[in-house]
Every structure is written in structure tokens, then in C-alpha cells.
Amino acid sequence: MTEFHTSTAEGLISNFYNTYDLEEMAQKVMPKGAFGYVASGAGDMFTLRENIRSFEHKLIVPHALKDVEKPDVSTTFDGNQLTSPMIMAPIAAHKLANERGELASAEGVHRYNTIYSISSYSSFDLPDVTKALQGTPEWFQFYYSKDDGINRHIMDRVKEQGIKAIILTADATVSGNRETDARNGFTFPVGMPIVEEYLAQQTGESLKSIYGSAKQKLSTKDVENIASYSGLPVYVKGVESPEDVEPLLAAGASGIWVSNHGGRQLDSGPASFDSLSLISKAVDKRVPIVFDSGIRRGQHVFKALASGADLVAVGRPAIYGLALGGAIGVEQVFNQLTAELEIVMQLAGTQTIADIKNFDLRDNPYDPGVLSNDPARLKLY
């Protein structure tokens, strides 16, 4: 097995101007396999690339003389006053980026004051992460297993921990075709105590046999079971089709999470942003919408909110910040995106997050992807 050395960084990150810089910088400090796992996607990585490029399909038209000064990015969600609508997306095994893993990322999110999403595949256990959050709201990303005993045990622990919501991962019934991991011979060099603890004590089965690459069935019945057993709100993560919305709401979903797993599951699927407005129309404000996949700029956050998202989850950039600066690096990433968002709000003439949600984006007439369905205009290109 290749020797694994992860970052011990803790402190301000210098010489970066945007989150794209952080990706290049993180590649230099993270082990090759770990960086490949975080940064890459499935197959040809078309969907991963389109997640970012798709934001170019819409334009933010500036508005003048709107009496806007010092835009307010704060928001209230589920009774919690948050610094902004940006939250921490659930990502596995933060120890791949920093020795303190989820403890450091939780501290960074606490400093910023927003919602933290912890993965079933966390490299630190629930009580440790909750302690690091110091009362900051926490959600749990649930990888539903084939073993009902494991599922109930984990939900019991989640309730005991005071976690506020469960995020059901709906788009990982089989692992995506992640060729970068295969080329690097990547296997997880860190433990995953939340799911491993019960396996070791009760079942005698391996993590791979329960959560591995074998196909797994999930249905709306599982949403009902989780909501009923846990008594917690259930956000269904991985929704890309508006046709899926009605069955999920009927099953008791408390929120819809628009995501394509950061382009890590189905390659050649739609960019998450291109699905957002369609799903928002289907939801029709009946439940909250969370959005992730492709967020790299403050204007991306703005466009997601203007397209129907209530919360915008930040993933890879936060992990790069973790690798480069620990808890402070994570906080810096959120602060950087916030500063960009404030500039966009000022120039767009939007004082509050509510104003963004009422803002009309314009189709981009310069984008060939937008024009491809319009033969009369396509000849311009």
C-alpha cells in the first residue's frame, strides 16, 4: 500500500484570489490518490465540467439606482440565523485533505456560522464532530444500507446526537465509473467509524459487502421508513428530474436536494444548475430546495438562489481550503464566496437574499449551448 501523508495545515491561506486557485494549490499538498478522489468525476467527466460551465447559460443583468448599500447576505432557515444561504455539502473522509479531518472542517463552518452536513463516511465519529461544531446546526447524509439493523442503529445515534435533519443519498445505488480512482489504485486509507463501528460489533460483515459497489434498491418507501422511524425531516439528495418531485413529496420528503453528486455518478447527465429551475417549478415552494454541484463563484450562488434554491451547498472548494489551511482555510473559502456574492448583489441591485430570489436571470444569447435548439440563430456561430 502506498504510504499516505495528509496535510497538517492550520492557518490563513495566502496568494489565492478565487476557488479555482485553491484547487491548483491543494493538488500540490494532497496525496495523489486523495486529490484524485476529491477532484475527479465519473467517466469522461463531461458532467463534472458542465456543472461549472452551465452557469454561463444564464446572465445577471445589472440594475442601476436601486438604493442598495452593503447588501445583507444573512438568512434564516428552520429557525436558525445563518451568515448566508451557503452551507457545507456532505463529503466523505475529510482526513484525505487534513489530519484533523471533519473536526477542522466543522470548526471552520462553526466560525462562519452555517449548517454542516456530515457524511455517513466521515473519518471521525458523530460525537467528535458535533462537539467541534459547538452548537452549529448539523445534518446527516445517510447512505442507506442493505441491513435494516445498521440503518436503525445509525438513525438512533443521529437522533441521540441532536442532529436536525437526514439527507438521504438517492443517487448512489451503484458507484459511478470513477476511472481516476482506478488508475491511481485508490482505496480509502482512513477509517469510517460511523458505519464501521456497528459492522464490527454486530454483523461480522465488511464495509464493502454492506455499502459496496453491488447494486442496491431504493424507493420512495425508504423515504417513508426513514421519516417515520427517525421523526426527522428527510431531504432527498440527488434529484435531477422534475418528474421525481411529486412521488418524493407524497412519500414525506421534507426537502428536495438538487445535485448530481458533483459529476461523480452518472456521466453525460445534465448539469445540476440546468435541472434546478425545472425542479423548482415542480416543487412550487412546497418544501425547501437545496442545491449543489459546480459552485465555484459568488455569482454561481446568486444564480442558484435566483433559480429557486433556498440553500446552496459548497463541497470541493471547502475541502481544498481544509487541505491548505485547516479550519481557518474552510472559513476563508466561505468568506471568499461571500465577498464575491456581496459584489454581485450590489451591482445587480439586490439588497437581501429575498431580493435575489425574486431576481429574473436572462438567457445567455452568446452561449452556443443555449442557441443549439434555435436553428435560425445558430448560424451566427
Image (cartoon, grey):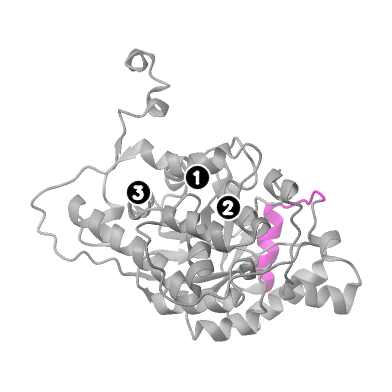
Image point (67%, 69%), residue name? 5
Residue 272: mark: 1
Alpha-carbon distance for marks 3 and 2? 23 Å
Residue 362 placement (x, y as % from top left): 28, 37
Image point (37%, 56%), residue name? 18
Alpha-carbon distance for marks 3 and 1? 12 Å
Mark 3 secondary-structure assignment: helix
Question: Where does the magenta region start and end?
Answer: 214-229
Which sits in the foreground, 17 or 55?
17
Residue 341 placement (x, y as % from top left): 30, 58
Q: Residues within 10 Å of mark 2 (few under 14, many from 20)?
A: some
Which sits in the foreground, 47 or 222?
47
Image point (45%, 79%), residue name? 110
Q: Are discs 1 and 2 less than 8 Å apart at CB?
A: no
| Location of mark 2 (residue) | 39
Mark 1 secondary-structure assignment: helix
Q: Are discs 3 and 2 less than 8 Å apart at CB?
A: no
Q: Earlier in the sequence, mark 3 or mark 2?
A: 2
**Kind of residue at disc 3:** Lys
Q: Nearer the viewer, mark 3 or mark 2?
A: 2
Q: Where 309 sits versus 273, above or below? A: below
Residue 144 placement (x, y as % from top left): 72, 62
Q: Residue furthest right?
A: 204
Residue 225 placement (x, y as % from top left): 70, 64
Residue 260 visible? The answer is yes
**Kind of residue at disc 2:** Ala
**Kind of residue at disc 1:** Ser
Q: Nearer the viewer, mark 1 or mark 2?
A: 2
Residue 303: mark: 3
Q: Earlier in the sequence, mark 3 or mark 1?
A: 1
Tell me: 172 left or right of 50: right
Q: Are discs 3 and 1 less than 8 Å apart at CB?
A: no
